[in-house]
């Protein structure tokens, strides 16, 4: 890792690594767009908001004929040990993606719901459109962070506290629902949605692993959540409440709706 990475960023990077493996196990895939043959043949791929680059590395190793570029606003990606077909770039996608127009055959972006404001989403989608080749595919994947399937009162309070916090910061808790319209307005065509309900703390090992990731994430943001609910200033009270959410999710068989969209930039006529 880069020398300037903080302890907190390292812990977050470790969580994102595990999160990738949980999602791959649940979805049995790393992507949804119909690009497998292209990846085998050799194309140029952008991992937008790559974070610690778990997806980028795994894809680079799986498809050695393709070239992968990871881009992120934080320098949390490995810089020395990496597959020969993987490179990284430090930049904010909501401001400028430092590549020429029509560079990439395929763009992948996942889980930026907590990183982009409403304006950021508008700018980022325009930048993704600009650097994608005509006929190329973009894939954007986000969860619905506000409304879970079969959530009871504990989870409802937690999710809507999170949603209100995001809205107060001009962020978009329902971006997963809005992406189809936003992609179309940006100019992308043939938008396809693959929605998967991910089990939260029930049924199988995946449900337990997803809950552990969920719990860890919510414990980390307690200071922010406590601004809306003063009783959560007490770390023990808050942790007990999150554990009640886990019990509720198990009993109700709660699911997180996982939205994966892919679309194309129109081909040149």
Image (cartoon, rainbow, N blue to C red):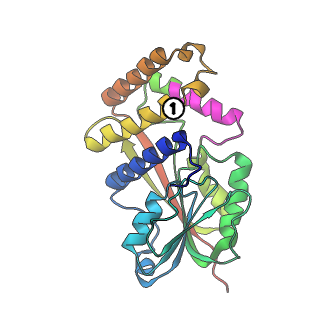
Near-viewer residue (54 or 243) = 54
Image position of 208 (left or right of 84): left
Tell me which residue sits at (50%, 80%) in the image.
43
The image position of residue 72, as x and y in percent, is 60, 57
Q: Nearer the viewer, residue 17 or 129?
A: 17
In the orientation shown, which residue stands out farthest toward the bottom?
A: 269
Residue 247 coordinates in the image, percent (x, y): 34, 24
Density class for disc 1 (Cα within 10 Å; few <14, some 14-19, many ≥20) is few
Q: Quadrant of the C terminus?
A: bottom right
Q: Is residue 267 left or right of residue 111?
A: right
Q: Which residue is mark 1?
A: 220
Question: Residue 241: x percent and y percent?
Answer: 44, 19
Whether residue 134 is situated above or below residue 4 in the rendered picture: below
Query: Was residue 23 drawn as part of the magenta stretch in this picture?
Result: no
- Helix, strand or loop: magenta stretch: helix
* Residue 32 can be seen in this image: no
Q: Is residue 165 magenta?
A: yes
**Residue situated furthest front in the rendering:** 3
What is the tally of numbered marks visible in this picture?
1
Q: Position of residue 236 (x, y in %)?
A: 45, 16
Residue 198: name its quadrant: top left
Does residue 193 show up?
yes
For the point 32% across and 53% down, which residue is it? 25
Task: Check disc 1 and report its element: helix, strand or loop.
Answer: helix
Tell me which residue sits at (61%, 27%) in the image.
224
Q: Which region is colored magenta?
A: 158-173
């Amino acid at each position: 890792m880069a020398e300037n990475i903080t302890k907190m960023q390292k812990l977050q990077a470790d969580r994102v690594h595990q999160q990738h493996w949980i999602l791959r196990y649940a979805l049995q895939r790393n992507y949804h767009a119909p690009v497998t043959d292209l990846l085998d043949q050799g194309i140029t791929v952008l991992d937008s908001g790559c974070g610690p680059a778990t997806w980028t590395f795994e894809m680079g190793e799986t498809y050695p004929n393709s070239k992968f570029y990871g881009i992120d606003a934080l320098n949390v990606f490995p810089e020395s040990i990496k597959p020969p077909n993987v490179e990284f770039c430090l930049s904010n996608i909501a401001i400028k993606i430092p590549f020429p127009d029509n560079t990439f055959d395929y763009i992948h972006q996942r889980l930026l719901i907590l990183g982009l404001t409403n304006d950021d989403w508008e700018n980022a989608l325009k930048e993704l459109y600009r650097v994608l080749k005509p006929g190329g595919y973009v894939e954007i994947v986000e969860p619905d962070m506000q409304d879970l399937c079969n959530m009871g009162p504990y989870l409802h309070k937690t999710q809507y506290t999170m949603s209100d916090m995001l809205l107060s910061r001009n962020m978009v808790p329902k971006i997963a629902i809005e992406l189809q319209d936003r992609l179309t307005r940006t100019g992308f065509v043939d938008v396809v949605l693959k929605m998967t309900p991910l089990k939260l703390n029930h049924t199988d090992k995946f449900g337990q692993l997803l809950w552990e990731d969920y719990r860890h994430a919510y414990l980390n943001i307690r200071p922010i959540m406590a601004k809306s609910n003063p009783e959560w200033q007490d770390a023990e009270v808050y942790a007990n409440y999150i554990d009640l959410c886990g019990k509720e999710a198990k009993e109700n068989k709660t699911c997180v709706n996982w939205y994966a969209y892919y679309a194309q930039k129109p081909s040149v006529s």
